[in-house]
Image (tube, grey):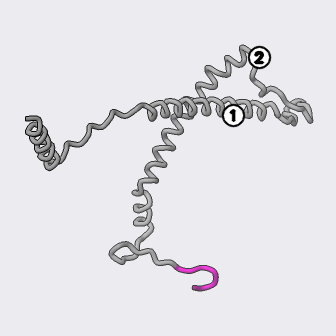
């Protein structure tokens, strides 16, 4: 061990040193990497669905109830624009708009997860069909026959 670092020799099962390509192949072939990739792809598709739900359905409904929900035009002008100089302004309305969008999206995702958990719980609570009792062992059948024969002979 030199200094603070220790050299580690990575070897495969045959004892040969692996190259960068071999290590990458091993890393990428693990199941959790594939699961993560699928999760990212599905998550990005789900993001567009949630964004559309918020932008096209929920935000207009909120605007109908409380008025305009677009805060992006709000700004504090520090230096007014003059000629070709654009001026300086603190656009705090953009920040407020992003916070409102985040809260709406967070609420929608929360509601969807809560709804899915409710359905999952109902599905888990459904009683499973009662399992049929196992067939009795052949020895038990023979003992039952003997019992029945003894009961009949005792009645006579």
Q: Position of residue 79 (x, y in %)?
A: 92, 35
For disc 1, the neighbor class at 10 Å (few under 14, some 14 to 19, many from 20) is: few
Q: Residue 31 versus residue 29: which sits nearer the camera?
A: 31
Q: Residue at x 78, y 26 (%)?
A: 71
- The relative height of residue 60 versus residue 74 in the rendered view (above or below) is above
* Disc sitting over residue 102 in the figure: 1
Q: Does the magenta-highlighted stretch encompass residue 2?
A: yes
User: Is 145 or 88 nearer to us in this picture?
Assistant: 145
Q: Residue furthest right?
A: 79
In the picture as drawn, the residue positioned furthest to the top comes out as 64
Question: Which quadrant of the figure contains the C terminus?
Answer: top left
What x and y, as percent, mark residue 154? 11, 39
Q: Classify residue 11 as left or right of residue 44.
A: left
Q: Position of residue 148 (x, y in %)?
A: 12, 39
Measured as percent of width and height from the top left, residue 106 is found at 65, 34
Magenta span: predominant SS is loop
Secondary structure category for the residue under label 1: helix
Kindly state the secondary structure of the residue where label 2 is placed: helix
* Residues drawn in magenta: 1-7
Any mark on residue 66, and which?
Answer: 2
Cα gap from disc 2 to disc 1, whole angstroms: 18 Å
> Horizontal placement of 144 versus 59: left or right?
left
Q: Nearer the viewer, residue 25 or 138?
A: 138
Taking the spot 57% from the left edge, 85% from the top edge, the residue there is: 1
**Which corner quadrant of the image does residue 28 belong to?**
bottom left
* Residue at image coords 76%, 18%: 68
Residue plotted at (42% across, 65% down): 21
Is residue 79 a member of the stretch shown in magenta? Answer: no
- In the rendered image, which quarter is residue 109 located in? top right
Give the vertical position of 58 relative to 153 (above or below): above
């Amino acid at each position: 061990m030199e200094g603070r670092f220790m050299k580690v020799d990575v070897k495969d099962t045959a004892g040969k040193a692996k190259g960068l390509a071999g290590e990458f192949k091993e890393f990428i072939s693990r199941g959790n990497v594939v699961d993560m990739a699928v999760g990212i792809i599905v998550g990005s598709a789900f993001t567009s669905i949630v964004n559309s739900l918020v932008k096209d359905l929920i935000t207009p409904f909120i605007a109908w109830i409380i008025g305009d929900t677009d805060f992006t035009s709000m700004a504090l002008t520090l230096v007014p624009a003059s000629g070709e100089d654009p001026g300086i302004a603190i656009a705090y309305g953009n920040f407020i708009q992003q916070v409102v969008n985040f809260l709406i999206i967070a609420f929608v995702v929360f509601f969807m997860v809560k709804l899915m958990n409710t359905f999952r719980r109902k599905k888990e609570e459904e009683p499973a069909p009662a399992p049929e009792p196992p067939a009795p062992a052949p020895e038990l059948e023979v003992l039952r026959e003997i019992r029945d024969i003894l009961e009949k002979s005792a009645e006579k």
